[in-house]
Amino acid sequence: MQDSKPSRVVVFTGLPGTGKSSLAEQVARAIQAPAFAGDWLMGALKPYGLLDRLDRPTYLAMYYNLLHTLITRQLILGQSAVVDCLINDDTAGRWRDDAARYDARLLVVECVCTDIELHRSRIVGRKRDIPGWHEIGWDHVERMRTEYPPLAVSHITVDAVNSIDDNVRYVLEQINS
């Protein structure tokens, strides 16, 4: 039986430690869509040594193209996808165009944490257990803050100072509106 709702691509973006992964996983379960996480993809490739030989532009191109391929496959099948990765306006624009090509809708959810001390505490000492992948420190978050300016494309924002249940509820309301 085919779902009468259009396919959706829901992208959770934001700095590390803002709740992207937790929200993406819960929303993916709620809308019964696969969750594609960039860190899990890279963790699967890391043991083969491929990532160590790449310069940053090539690494990022591969990262986003892998995710793009997974998203496109879902859209070809008429299905939705949830994506957990940090994106910029250019990537959001490309993915929005691709979603439209398959009569799907893109929703970009920017995850933030307006309480700096809470944000730092969410990073320090966390253990995500992603096979093949590394943990990061606060210095990495600060570097990412300079590399990824705030989004200008259409998006909604959720704040990690709110409960995860409230944030999930808000995102699901936006998906279903």
Image (cartoon, rainbow, N blue to C red):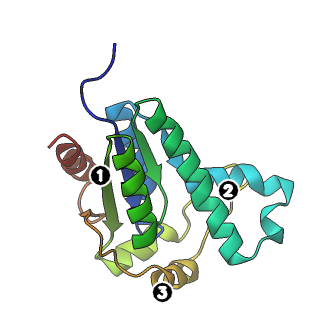
Q: Which amino acid does label 1 sit on?
A: Ile
The residue under label 2 is 42
Instruction: Give whichever of 142, 54 is nearer the camera.
Output: 54
Q: Could you tell whether 44 is left or right of 137 in the image? A: right
Residue drawn at the location 53% of the way across and 79% of the way down: 138
Where residue 29 sits, quadrant-wise, is top left
- Whether 49 is drawn above or below 82: the answer is below
Give the number of the mark in front: 1 or 2. 2
Q: Could you tell whether 7 is left or right of 163 in the image? A: right
Q: What element carries label 2?
A: helix
- Whether 113 is drawn above or below 85: the answer is below
The residue under label 3 is 146
Where residue 81 sits, quadrant-wise, is top left
Q: Could you tell whether 100 is left or right of 54 in the image? A: left
Which quadrant of the rendered structure holds the N terminus?
top left
Whether residue 165 can be seen here: yes
Q: Could you tell whether 8 is left or right of 176 in the image? A: right
Q: How crowded is mark 3: few (under 14 residues within 10 Å), some or many (20 or more)?
A: few
| Sooner in the amino-acid sequence: mark 2 or mark 3 | 2
Residue drawn at the location 63% of the way across and 66% of the way down: 61
Q: What residue type is labelled 3?
A: Thr
Q: Residues within 10 Å of mark 1 (few under 14, many from 20)?
A: some
The residue under label 1 is 164
